[in-house]
Amino acid sequence: MTAFTFPGQGSQKPGMGAAWQDHPSWEIVDEASEASGRDVARLLLEADADELTQTRNSQLATFVTSMIVLDAIERVGVEPAIHAGHSLGEYSALTAAGVLSLADGVRLVTERGNAMQAAAEERPGTMAAVLGLEPELVEQACAATDGDAWVANDNAPGQVVIAGDPVALAAAGDMAKELGAKRVMPIKVGGAFHTPFMAPARDRLRKAIADVELRDPNRPVVANVDAAVHTDGPEWARLLGAQLTSPVRWRPSLATLADSGASVFLELGPGTVLTGMAKRTLTGTTNIAVGSPGEIEQLLETLAGLEGDRRALTLNTTEGEFLQAVERLVVSPATGPFTPEAGLEAGMALERGQLVGTVGDTEVRSAFAGELQGMVALAGERVMTSQPVAWLRVSA
């Protein structure tokens, strides 16, 4: 089955929205701008690296980009069985799972970014990555320092992030090296996130969380603070409040996703950080990052070739029923007027690679073999890149 994962702050980059401007999913940007009261399009298209590094900007820009990618993925019919997000990405996961509406997700992320930036300005701190040392020994290094230093992220085997006061953090890094760490790398961030330094932001965010509706998720979500599966919407008020001052338990969260049956991990949003962590943590899984329209086409081709876990591409299932069939969408590889291939009718068998039609001068071929259920696009209709044009059913 498929897990959708969502990146956190630090994955942003200048111009990361440019590839999506002409895609139907760009409409998410207008909704996000209205909900946040900010010009999100400018953030995604024009902001430079320094501006995007600011916490209030990086969090909103990363969240909205993940929502654009999610919307585009949903348009081609790929759905998950479970969700998780790293730090900020947890808000993306909750929005994807229906716990938060898009507007409420935008508002909470906006408040979270503002609150965390204010807390960091009130109590300056920093973060560093400790490579090649087990989390228990990293905790030991932090505890042995005469100052404020904590483990902030347990990301992957041999990759732990520490955070706190800069002087204490330098001492903890030296101690980690004495205990066997291969490297200690400073991280350019605006504060000591996921530590007690964020207590003012936590208190401020809790007030904002109290003003939104937290619905039960349509798919389970794994929480950062305990690496456990949660299916109760209101419970997330407590979990999100605790998240700001608690370590992100990402490595255990990946194990929980795998133990729940996930074998395909899709990272939706800018960057490939989570994909790299999954590769380092898990074995026997397929790990794919999707951050641009072109990568959706690559995703569909990869998924079409998978022969193991048939649940990974399920569009509709009945609870408790073993899948006897799955549905697939054939999507447009280009933008332009659609012309269906002559002679295609519902009920016909399609071979993988068979011509379904053309978009302008570009051929549209099915990435799957199965029984044609019908055409989604009409002859002469202008379609966009990655827009569905036909759907078929594949017998298991």
Image (tube, rainbow, N blue to C red):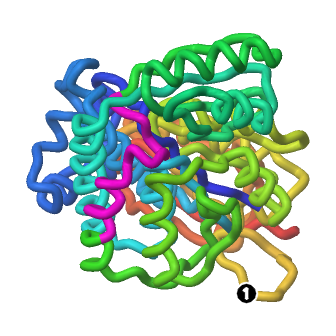
Q: Quadrant of the N terminus?
A: bottom right
**Horizontal side of residue 233 vs 256, given as left or right:** left
Classify residue 348 by image quadrant: bottom right
Residue 196: give x, y in percent of width and height. 45, 48
Q: Could you tell me if residue 207 is visible in this image?
A: yes
251 w.r.t. 223: above or below: above
**Horizontal side of residue 308 vs 349, given as left or right:** right
Magenta stretch: dominant secondary structure:
helix
Residue 117: give x, y in percent of width and height. 25, 40
Q: Is residue 159 covered in magenta? A: no
Which is nearer the eye, 290 or 173? 173
207 w.r.t. 197: above or below: below
371 w.r.t. 282: above or below: below
Residue at the image position 33 percent from the left and 43 percent from the top: 59
Residue 101: give x, y in percent of width and height. 34, 72
Mark 1 Cα-neighbour bin, 10 Å: few <14, some 14–19, many ≥20: few
Secondary structure beneath dot 1 equals: loop
Q: Quadrant of the C terminus?
A: bottom right
What is the span of residues highlighted in magenta in the rendered image?
Answer: 190-206
Which is nearer the eye, 35 or 211? 211
Q: Amino acid at mark 1?
A: Thr
Q: Could you tell me if residue 276 is visible in this image?
A: no
Classify residue 9 by image quadrant: top left
Residue 265: give x, y in percent of width and height. 70, 48
Residue at the image position 48 percent from the left and 45 percent from the top: 195
Q: Mark 1 = which residue?
A: 318
Residue at the image position 46 percent from the left and 83 percent from the top: 234
306 w.r.t. 216: above or below: above
Which is nearer the eye, 344 or 41? 41
Q: Is residue 202 covered in magenta? A: yes
